[in-house]
Image (spheres, grey):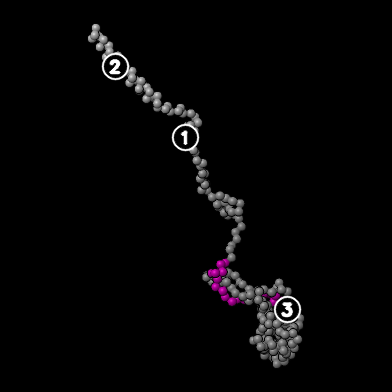
């Protein structure tokens, strides 16, 4: 009887210990916080933000109204304009060009004063000579006049001076739109008498700048000083 009791006591102690250990394990597990359930809001908050994308520029050139379309070839039937010659490639050379119409009217005006008179007008300037020797253009600088008058005596300064005044009245009466070039032209006047001649050369502005009130001999003398 005593032996059975001891066996029951041992068995109760083991059961008690087992229950005590199990209670401890359950107590420890209950102390660990449970993870909160995931919701749609939490998933959205943790998702990475999408960045805006930058459009890649088109490599094809853009055609605008002010410029021709790059993709299209030039119109072969369109007007073709040639560029003026490059002046840097020019070799300049003094040159003359006849002015037939002006020469004709100038001569007629002189012959109205003296039937034997002769006169011509021409443009003086420079030719633009290209490396191949051709003339690209003529650049006029002034309109010059040559005239020949008959006189009685080459030593008569009064007569020569009077003819200078008359010839200059004809030249200064020419319309400005018939005068070519920016500079004042030159007058080359030749007097002839008894197989001899005498010449005088001056610029138009030199004549116009003579003092007012000069006599005919003084006009001749002043212009001779400019030779």
Q: Which residue is mark 1?
A: 46
Farthest-out residue, left: 3
In this rendering, the label closer to the viewer, 2 or 1 = 2
Mark linked to residue 4: none
Tell me which residue sits at (27%, 14%) in the image: 10
Residue hosting label 3? 172
Q: Report x, y in % for residue 225.
A: 66, 88
Q: Is residue 177 above or below residue 34?
A: below
User: Is there CB contact under 8 Å for labels 3 and 1?
Assistant: no
- Identified at 69% across, 74% down, the residue is 179
User: How much space separates mark 3 and mark 2, taking CA atoms?
Assistant: 150 Å
Q: Nearer the viewer, mark 3 or mark 2?
A: 2
Quadrant location of the C terminus?
bottom right
Q: Residue at x 30, y 14 (%)?
A: 12
Residue 151 on image: x %, y %: 72, 88
Confirm whether the magenta stretch covers residue 100: yes
Disc 2 secondary structure class: helix
Q: Decide whether residue 107 is among the magenta residues.
A: no
Find the magenta span and give its range: 85-106
The foreground one among 15 and 191 is 15
Quarter of the picture containing the N terminus is: top left
Query: Horizontally, is 180 left or right of 34 in the view?
Result: right
Q: Is residue 125 above or below residue 24?
A: below
126 shown above or below 71: below
- Per the model, the C-alpha gap separating discs 3 and 1 is 100 Å
Crowding at mark 2 (Cα within 10 Å: few <14, some 14-19, many 20+): few
Q: Is 29 situated left or right of 96 in this image?
A: left
In the image, which disc is placed on residue 14?
2
Mark before the other along the chain sequence, 2 or 1: 2
Position in image of residue 166 (x %, y %): 74, 83
């Amino acid at each position: 009887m005593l032996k059975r009791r001891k066996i029951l006591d041992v068995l109760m102690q083991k059961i008690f210990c087992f229950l005590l250990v199990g209670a401890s394990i359950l107590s420890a597990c209950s102390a660990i916080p449970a993870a909160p359930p995931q919701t749609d809001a939490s998933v959205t908050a943790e998702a990475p933000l999408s960045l805006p994308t930058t459009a890649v520029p088109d490599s094809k050139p853009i055609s605008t109204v002010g410029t021709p379309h790059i993709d299209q070839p030039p119109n072969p039937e369109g007007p073709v304009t040639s560029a003026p010659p490059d002046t840097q490639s020019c070799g300049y050379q003094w040159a003359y060009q006849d002015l037939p119409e002006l020469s004709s009217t100038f001569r007629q005006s002189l012959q109205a004063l003296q039937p034997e008179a002769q006169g011509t007008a021409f443009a003086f300037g420079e030719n633009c000579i290209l490396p191949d020797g051709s003339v690209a253009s003529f650049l006029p600088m002034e309109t010059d006049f040559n005239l020949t008058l008959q006189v009685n005596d080459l030593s008569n300064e009064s007569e020569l001076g009077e003819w200078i005044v008359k010839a200059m009245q004809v030249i200064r009466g020419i319309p400005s739109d018939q005068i070519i070039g920016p500079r004042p032209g030159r007058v080359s006047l030749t007097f002839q008498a008894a197989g001899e001649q005498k010449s005088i050369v001056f610029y138009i502005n030199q004549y116009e700048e003579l003092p007012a009130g000069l006599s005919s001999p003084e006009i001749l003398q002043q212009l001779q000083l400019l030779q």
